[in-house]
Image (cartoon, helix red, strand yellow):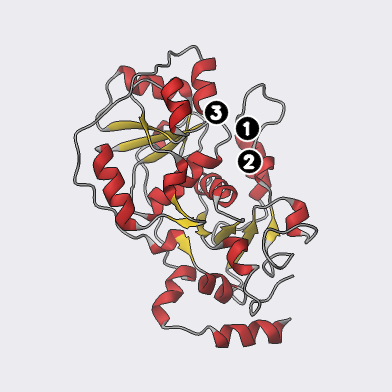
Amino acid sequence: MKNSQQTAIKRFLIPTFFLLIVSDTWVVWQNAYADEQPRELKFIVEAHWLNKQMATHSNNLKIIDVRNQDNYKISHVPGAINFPVELSFEGSRIVSIKKIRQLFRKLGIHNSDRLVLYDDGHIKNAAHVFWMLETYGHEQLAVLDGGLPAWQNAGYQSTHEVVYYPPSKYIPTITASRLATKMGALLSLNNPNVVIIDSRQADEYEGRKSRAQRSGHIPKAINITTDKLLDETASLPKLKALPELRSLFNHIDKSSLVMTYCNRGKDSAMTYLIMRSLGYNTSVYDGGWLEWGNDMQLPIE
């Protein structure tokens, strides 16, 4: 296995600057919500916190509903604007920086805005938009635990009124440390400081099922499925309690660089969100198994 990995690395050797993907100098963004979290999850907020911010007319707060347009029109958090999660994709990859600039300017979002994202409560869709925004340099972000169901279950009102903001001059920037590439994943195979997490289901990780031409997983990847992050006993979708979430990742040293992947990006983005919230230095391999599993020259297990 080592010989095949070394051969693959030589075949894909590229200029030094691509090593930023697995370097020890990844940037950890400081988040404005850090001192306000009742659950001590840096990027996760609760419905009562959001309601309080809205009641006090918190400066620069904007709420983004990432569900599809039809569901948004039926009911949403008052004041929320709609950015369907599919707009964060181009095919199975992250949307281009040019497209995001156009979309966010049209929505009236500013670089200084404090954005709270929510979905149907299963976190994956909001997490993908969260990761995309971190990749494009937005610093003040949070995700609503439980999404719209949690908001409504807490007794807060929802509305069908559509909100519009004046166009902005939003300028996204690339934060390379949040976006891992095929080359970054390949180089990490021989880097003991990099931990790779496969967020797909066990039958895909173990090779019994695959959405790519080949079955299995990236060598040295460990399998932590996203269903382990949710409280299955709750009546509505909700993240597990903080001690349980910590226990899932306790075996991973926080000095490590963590790279997550799945098939299309939603599951790995959810893992990314939780690990970032717990203080890990994390990126998402955007190509995921759909790219790796279809490249016959790359090693697999």
Secondary structure beneath dot 3 equals loop
Badge 1 element: loop
Q: Where does the image place residue 229, in percent across and percent down from the top left?
A: 64, 40
Kindly give the residue lying farthest to the front in the view shown: 70
Q: Quick check: can you spot residue 111?
A: no
Badge 2: how crowded within 10 Å, few (<14), some, or many (20+)?
Answer: some
Of the 4 image quadrants, the one containing the N terminus is: bottom right
Residue 245 is marked as 2
Q: Residue 83: x and y, percent?
A: 39, 38
The type of residue carrying mark 2 is: Leu
Q: Label 1 belongs to which residue?
A: 241
Q: Is residue 199 shown above or below 16?
A: above
Q: Looking at the image, which is closer to me, 15 or 93? A: 93
Q: Residue at x 68, y 58 (%)?
A: 211
Left or right: where 27 falls relative to 180: left
Could you say which disc has been placed on residue 146 in the image?
3
Q: CA distance from mark 2 to mark 1?
A: 6 Å
212 or 64, which lies in front?
A: 212
Q: Which is in the foreground here, disc 3 or disc 1?
A: 3
